[in-house]
């Protein structure tokens, strides 16, 4: 990777919920809430659900990139180009985005800019995603259970990372294509 990388290493943090038993908000094919299910059943039956993608930019325009732990149920060991995750039962999407930012990398109290919503499907997922931008230059505290490592990279360099999670890659490509990375996040 070109340029100097600033890496942040995991610190142990308590994990309050056993992930497989976490109750997830299910939605229909039109993104309307239609029930709830434990995460394991949502994955097993490929139920439609919501997820958040918070792209964290520093003052130099670099993105915070995470390396997922090998214990992650989906895309283990991949580069994740955004912080985020599934939306809990009854949880508002923006609240889930804030929760995931704090849980995964310790970022809190920063403005979220909602950019767009999108659909992502593959052999194992049916997702309605919400993409956000965040400006942040403070310290990171990584969630050891989910984030093996983190570093900063320019968006174009981030797209060259392999393997990367295809859903976050798709959202980043749209952020770039639609010009979201060239505007002030707090607008």
Image (spheres, grey):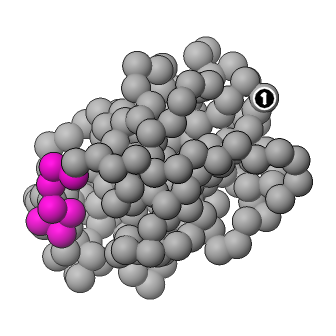
Q: Residue at x 15, y 49 (%)?
A: 16
Q: How far from the left and from the top, in percent, is residue 83?
A: 48, 47
Quarter of the image with the N terminus is: bottom right
Q: How far from the left and from the top, in percent, is residue 50?
A: 33, 54
Q: Decide which of 108, 131 is in the foreground and name it.
A: 108
Q: Is residue 42 above or below residue 31?
A: below
Q: Is residue 123 above or below residue 111?
A: below
Q: How far from the left and from the top, in percent, is residue 59?
A: 72, 24
Quadrant for residue 97, please give it: top left
Q: Residue at x 15, y 62 (%)?
A: 18
Res. 145 visible in picture: yes
Q: Residue furthest top?
A: 187
Q: Residue furthest right?
A: 2
Res. 177 visible in picture: no
- Left or right side of 157 for 130: left
- What secondary structure is marked by label 1? loop
Asked if the stretch drawn in magenta spans residue 151, the answer is no
Quadrant for residue 168, please give it: bottom right
Q: Which residue is mark 1?
A: 60
Q: Is residue 72 above or below residue 179?
A: below
Quadrant for residue 60, please give it: top right
Quarter of the image with the C terminus is: top right
Q: Is residue 164 above or below residue 129?
A: below
- Left or right side of 49 for 84: right
- Residue segment shown in magenta: 15-21
Q: Residue at x 64, y 60 (%)?
A: 169
């Amino acid at each position: 990777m070109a340029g100097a990388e600033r890496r942040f290493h995991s610190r142990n943090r308590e994990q309050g919920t056993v992930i497989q038993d976490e109750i997830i908000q299910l939605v229909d094919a039109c993104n309307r809430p239609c029930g709830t299910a434990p995460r394991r059943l949502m994955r097993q039956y490929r139920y439609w659900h919501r997820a958040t993608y918070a792209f964290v930019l520093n003052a130099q325009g670099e993105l915070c990139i995470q390396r997922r732990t090998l214990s992650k149920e989906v895309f283990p060991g991949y580069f994740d180009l955004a912080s985020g995750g599934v939306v809990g039962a009854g949880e508002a999407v923006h609240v889930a985005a804030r929760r995931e930012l704090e849980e995964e990398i310790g970022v809190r109290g920063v403005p979220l800019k909602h950019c767009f919503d999108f659909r992502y499907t593959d052999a194992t997922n049916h997702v309605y995603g919400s993409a956000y931008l965040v400006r942040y230059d403070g310290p990171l505290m990584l969630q050891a259970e989910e984030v093996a490592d983190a570093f900063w990279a320019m968006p174009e360099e981030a797209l060259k990372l392999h393997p990367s999670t295809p859903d976050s890659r798709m959202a980043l490509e749209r952020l770039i294509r639609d010009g979201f990375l060239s505007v002030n996040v707090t607008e």
